[in-house]
Image: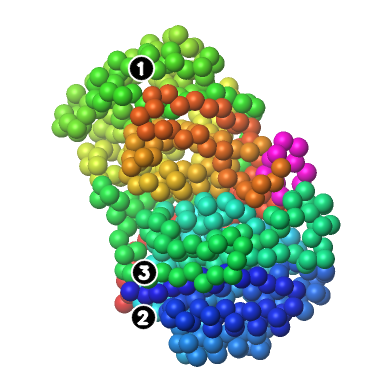
């Protein structure tokens, strides 16, 4: 077991004062005797500068007094300390860097930020190399700051290279960072995560009123959002700090648990990856093709109450209960099959064909409606779990599940993700468990998908609570997922805010602390029909802040780990 701690505090424009705060908080944390302390991003100076000279002046030298004292504290308390600062480099460039000091006071590693946010692009340069995995006597650590954890690429690459614990230093006023992005990164990689965030003003206090007026962000939202936390590989929040007070947040964890990548059904999450499908993530950024998309469509999640073949008898009534002009409705994974699934595949295929006919007949009363489900159908060299799109004319499109799943050992996987162009936008059919692979959804977004339809069966509660919502937010893609219930959770409909670009004027919403959290309508367990509207056109806007496009500015140059075949990790 190891005790880890996140240190939460405010920084100012006075570098000496910030050093004193860091040392005070490190000494305060020591009373809990952690083996690892993680400090926030920009611990040396708030991320606000008058000009390039000022940005350089307040940045640190690697061998300067500030960092030397942090190293000495690591030696004094015989622990690892991760701190993030703005750093002067030998080529006169500045980086945003996380540094890890070991219990002898030695500098173990430096990890430069890979994705810059807004005005950071003015003063700093991006990382040119991936960061290290740091081996300690209690496990393997990896570091990244703030924006690098808002999307999947950087954490995924570190997990693939053996990280058991993410050290995430934050400088964030966004409430959706703590409620969504931070906790999502742990369970989707089955690692532990320690996230340390700021409190207090994130810009100089004398500029608060002017910046609030210019950016249209209310004054009280210009503070660090706190809620530093420690998350388990299952997505459980082991400890969380307050929103606006200093805190030392700590928990005892066993990092060897992060070596188990199996899901409840026995599928190994990493062994089942299909790296060849994700190569686009590591290719040079180009604008995704944004096909025409409709302002708004009505959609639904359907959940027959009967199980097995009897569920087909409910389809007509479920469709009849939908609002007029509903464009798309999704059913749970393999909704019309029972526990004999796989015992007689020819019978399963026949049931799938019957399901298509029943769905088409139901759509005859609603000609604009398309139904999405997953069924057992013939595929190349065998049988597969296939997501289908059915209208009044019958089968419109199909997509084989692309990742192996231990629940369906008989299934043949598909070889390509195909999107469907419809009058209201571009649709990605994601069959069941494929949705837990963030790389695949990233590829769908890069190909211009506006909406993702997912007939699934939840295996773990994080998949709905963090996973599906994070897929919607980090890619700006609407998500429509239907599932049978699991421990009080089922599917959801995730729409997107039309306005989310920071530092621009918003006309339809006021900033409420959430930048890009999806607008979620939950599918209540046992609820037969869940309806909502989504805005496919919102998926065309990926610009989070100036020079920060969610797709075009992703760290594609450093994402090769995601599509290369991985060797089994060894401590040797």
The residue at which mark 2 appears reads as 137
**Numbered label attached to residue 143:** none
Helix, strand or loop status at disc 1: helix
Q: Which circle's residue, 1 or 3, is located before the other in the chain? A: 3
Relative to 252, 510 lies left or right:
right
- Residue positioned 61% across, 41% down in the render: 288
The residue at which mark 1 appears reads as 315
Foreground mark, 3 or 2, reads 3
Asked if the residues shown at circle 1 and circle 3 are in contact, with their CB atoms under 8 angstroms apart, the answer is no
Location of residue 512 in the rendering, given as x and y in whole percent from the top left corner: 66, 47
Give whichever of 226, 104 is nearer the camera.
226
Location of residue 503 in the rendering, given as x and y in whole percent from the top left corner: 75, 51
Q: Residues within 10 Å of mark 1 (few under 14, many from 20)?
A: many
Q: Residues within 10 Å of mark 2 (few under 14, many from 20)?
A: few
Mark pair 1, 2: CA separation: 57 Å
Kindly give the residue lying farthest to the left in the view shown. Answer: 343
Mark pair 1, 3: CA separation: 47 Å
Relative to 210, 276 lies left or right:
left
Mark pair 3, 2: CA separation: 14 Å
Relative vertical location of residue 141 with respect to residue 549 in this rendering, above or below:
below
Residue 55 in which image quadrant: bottom right
Helix, strand or loop status at disc 3: strand
**Numbered label attached to residue 253:** 3
- Residue positioned 49% across, 90% down in the render: 75
Residue 289 visible, this orientation: no
Quadrant of the image containing the N terminus: bottom left
Give whichever of 367, 71 is nearer the camera.
71
Q: Residues within 10 Å of mark 3 (few under 14, many from 20)?
A: some
The residue segment tinted magenta is 499-509
């Amino acid at each position: 077991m190891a005790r880890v701690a996140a240190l939460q505090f405010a920084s100012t424009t006075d570098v000496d004062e910030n050093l004193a705060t860091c040392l005070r908080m490190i000494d305060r944390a020591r009373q809990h005797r952690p083996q690892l302390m993680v400090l926030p991003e920009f611990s040396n100076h708030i991320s606000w500068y008058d000009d390039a000279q000022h940005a350089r002046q307040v940045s640190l030298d690697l061998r300067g007094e500030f960092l030397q004292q942090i190293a000495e504290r690591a030696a004094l308390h015989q622990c690892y300390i991760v701190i993030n600062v703005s750093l002067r480099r030998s080529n006169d460039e500045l980086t945003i860097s996380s540094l890890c000091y070991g219990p002898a006071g030695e500098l173990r590693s430096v990890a430069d930020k890979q994705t810059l946010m807004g005005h950071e692009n003015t003063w700093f340069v991006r990382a040119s190399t991936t960061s290290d995995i740091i081996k300690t006597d209690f496990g393997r650590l990896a570091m990244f700051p703030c924006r690098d954890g808002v999307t999947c690429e950087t954490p995924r690459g570190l997990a693939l290279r053996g990280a058991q614990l993410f050290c995430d230093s934050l400088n964030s006023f966004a409430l959706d960072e703590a409620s969504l992005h931070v906790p999502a990164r742990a369970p989707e990689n089955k690692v532990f995560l320690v996230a340390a965030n700021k409190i207090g003003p994130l810009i100089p206090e004398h500029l608060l009123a002017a910046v609030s007026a210019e950016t249209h962000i209310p004054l009280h939202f210009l503070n660090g959002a706190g809620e530093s936390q420690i998350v388990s590989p299952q997505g459980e929040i082991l400890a969380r700090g307050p929103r606006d007070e200093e805190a030392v947040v700590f928990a005892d964890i066993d990092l060897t648990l992060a070596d188990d990548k199996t899901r409840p059904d026995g599928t190994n999450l990493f062994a089942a990856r299909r790296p060849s499908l994700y190569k686009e993530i590591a290719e040079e950024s180009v604008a995704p093709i944004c096909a025409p998309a409709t302002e708004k469509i009505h959609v639904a999640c359907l959940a027959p109450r009967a199980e097995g073949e009897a569920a087909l008898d409910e389809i007509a009534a479920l469709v009849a209960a939908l609002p007029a002009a509903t464009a798309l409705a999704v059913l749970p994974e393999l909704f019309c099959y029972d526990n004999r699934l796989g015992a007689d595949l020819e019978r399963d295929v026949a049931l799938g064909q019957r399901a298509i006919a029943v769905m088409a007949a139901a759509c005859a009363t609603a000609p604009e409606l398309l139904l999405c489900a997953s069924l057992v159908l013939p595929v190349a060299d065998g049988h597969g779990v296939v997501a289908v799109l059915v209208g009044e004319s019958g089968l419109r499109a199909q997509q084989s599940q692309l990742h192996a799943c231990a629940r369906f050992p008989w299934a043949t996987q598909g070889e390509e993700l195909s999107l469907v162009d419809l009058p209201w936008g571009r649709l990605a059919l994601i069959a069941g468990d494929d949705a837990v692979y963030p790389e695949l959804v990233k590829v769908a977004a890069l190909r211009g998908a506006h909406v993702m339809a997912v007939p699934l069966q939840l295996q773990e509660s994080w998949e709905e609570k963090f996973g599906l919502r994070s897929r919607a937010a980090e890619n700006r893609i609407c998500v429509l997922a239907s599932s049978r219930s699991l421990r009080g959770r089922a599917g959801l409909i995730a729409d997107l805010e039309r306005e989310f670009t920071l530092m621009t004027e918003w006309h339809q919403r006021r900033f409420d602390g959430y930048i890009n959290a999806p607008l979620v309508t939950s599918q209540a367990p046992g609820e037969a029909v869940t309806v909502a509207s989504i805005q496919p056109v919102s998926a065309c806007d990926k610009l989070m802040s100036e020079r920060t496009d969610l797709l075009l500015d992703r760290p594609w140059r450093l994402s090769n780990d995601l599509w290369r075949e991985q060797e089994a990790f060894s401590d040797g």
